[in-house]
Amino acid sequence: MSEAVEGREAIVLLDRTREVVDPQLRATIDSLPGSLRRVAMYHFGWEHADGTPAAGSTGKAIRPALVLAATRALGGNECLAVSAAAAVELAHNFTLLHDDVIDEDPTRRHRPTAWTVFGTPDAIIAGDAMFAVALRLLAEDHHPASAAASRRLADCVIELCAGQQADCAFEERAPNDVSLDECLEMATAKTGALLGCACALGALYAGAGEEETAAMDAFGREAGLAFQLIDDLIGIWGDPDRTGKPAGADLAAHKKSLPVVAALTSGTAAGAELAELYRGPMNAATVRRAAEAVDRAGGRDWAQLQAADRMARAVHELSRAVPDLAAAGDLLALAEFVTRRTR
Amino acid sequence: MSEAVEGREAIVLLDRTREVVDPQLRATIDSLPGSLRRVAMYHFGWEHADGTPAAGSTGKAIRPALVLAATRALGGNECLAVSAAAAVELAHNFTLLHDDVIDEDPTRRHRPTAWTVFGTPDAIIAGDAMFAVALRLLAEDHHPASAAASRRLADCVIELCAGQQADCAFEERAPNDVSLDECLEMATAKTGALLGCACALGALYAGAGEEETAAMDAFGREAGLAFQLIDDLIGIWGDPDRTGKPAGADLAAHKKSLPVVAALTSGTAAGAELAELYRGPMNAATVRRAAEAVDRAGGRDWAQLQAADRMARAVHELSRAVPDLAAAGDLLALAEFVTRRTR
């Protein structure tokens, strides 16, 4: 199968996922009390800031697609896992609402972030309510796996919090003070954990045992780390028209993303140059020079190779969970989609 | 039984509650990853800001005491409800961490608030993790009621969020623009809901049916509203040495608490005077004048009578849940304790 066809397969899967999960998501958000509902509707792109209906820009739906695909891959009925898929997407969006407040990010999915529109207090509160509603959805789901799924999702959120906290702490430290291992651990907690949780929930909803569930979790984690590496590359070299963020946004924010830390810890002259640039304020010219320094220090190549390596590990874990890889085709297509996207 | 003896009874109950719930709380907080653990340990008063051990100031433990007392009152085994009691206290403290950020409160339990010590990002993240750990505790609790308890706690947090959001929105509105009904509804959501949830969880853990659980919830809600009314009175006339907050802190912050709104909507000259004072900045002298105006406008008396009325309703609801009121003695003692405390 050609790469283009596989990519198209993932897009079809994501579209199909949104088709079944969006109505559930929307009904859940609709159940929130007035003002919380309004912030959430805006965040999901279903309403403009003034409360009028909008087309929606609920994101790529990769996490719910992983839940449903994992259920299918293990012989379960994906229709019974729709609430679990929606719960994962709600938990993801709860963290986005809070992360945007914490990172003071002005833009999300090409639109002003919720806190810039409704203020920090409402964005914090709406995030809290979104997490609560995610857990209520699981608690109300009369599926034998829902209690185990709740436990796993709560655990995952604790790990996400630890990752976000580590990320914030890294920003305060000197350029050369963060090791690549610490950075990989942080990325695993911040991104890998929820993708792993999505796959594990899918496994639980297919009635899988502990070993299969753990392997599914590991598959999602490794794919998630690959995803983060690609995302970090995009944060430096992504096309502003497609990312909705200014060029080199992560460098301008002195972000210690994985390619940056790889460059800073490379022991090269370019790495030292980058450290020097990171000590001062950034403008368009220094952002360009920093991007070149990351590249020359080997940070770009390292991230690309590391992403490929993580994908290989993901496939290995997947083969443990689903010995017949033909049944895991959708999961592979999704994992390869996220690590190949160029925007 | 004399009032003094009843008060002492509640204090014994609260001490006994802390004795069984604190170890569970502490073990749960201890399970958090490094930096999240530190913020949580500080918030609960178990550590100083520098991480050295502290004596602890975990609050009065009214909510967990209600859980255990409700279980006992309905013939359940309170030892099986300790995790549920700890989960309610963790959820309560999650909201305190976020409320302090949102309200920019500098002091909590006579100590600097977590956000002033660790920064807003860490306080938000630690709050998120505390909510997650509360739900994990319920999900890991192998009690037949734990799923229903999770659902109820998630629902309650959504209501708490709506209450906190309404509270923030009220602060932005003109002094005369908030009705007393809106204000009572907000207080029910912000304070009554969690006390009701504590009692309902206790009922569920005793194997109670829907009707008894609903009556227990209503008991806690009414007692919670009485509690809030007293708290609002303390926010104006409380002794700074005992509250740990400056005198008239709520007035200085232009807070539209229940006695204030009662005064503002009283149609009296004193109410108009209060509205005028609330339009300008506050200093020690205007805070004193505002407190006198609330009193003269009848806001103080109204709040005291309303608190008594809510307590009467609470007792009525309790008699529906526990027909033999002798079995409900501990719940009554706790409810009367919170509405009689003078600090």
Image (spheres, coloured by chain):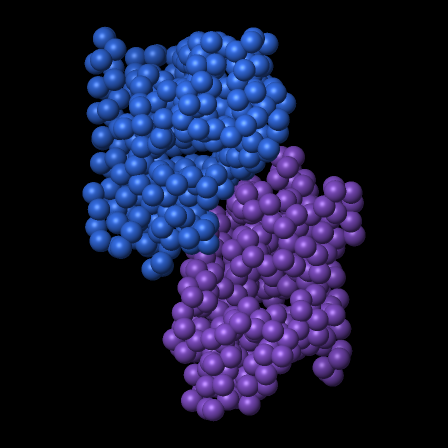
Chain colours: A purple, B blue
Can you give x and y, in whole percent of width and height, for residue B196 in the image?
45, 26
Relative to B67, say whether A323 is above or below.
below
Residue for point 31% across, 23% down: B239
Relative side of A138 to B308, left or right: right
Say if residue A300 shows up in the picture: no
Residue for point 47% across, 15% down: B294
In which quadrant of the rendered view does residue A27 lie? top right
Relative to A47, say whether A215 is above or below.
below
Say if residue B117 shows up in the picture: yes
In which quadrant of the rendered view does residue A105 lie? bottom right
Residue for point 55% across, 64% down: A195
Foreground pick, A32 / A88: A32
Can you give x and y, in whole percent of width and height, for residue B63 in the image?
36, 31
Q: Quadrant of the N terminus of chain B?
A: top left
Foreground pick, A119 / A167: A119
Residue for point 25% across, 15% down: B6
Foreground pick, A75 / B149: B149
Relative side of B283 to B241, left or right: right
In which quadrant of the rendered view does residue B168 lie? top right
Q: Quadrant of the C terminus of chain B?
A: top left
Can you give x and y, in whole percent of width and height, for residue B11 in the image?
24, 24
Relative to A99, say whether A48 is above or below.
above
Relative side of B117 to A96, left or right: left
Can you give x and y, in whole percent of width and height, for residue A139 in the image?
52, 43
Figure disc tally? 0
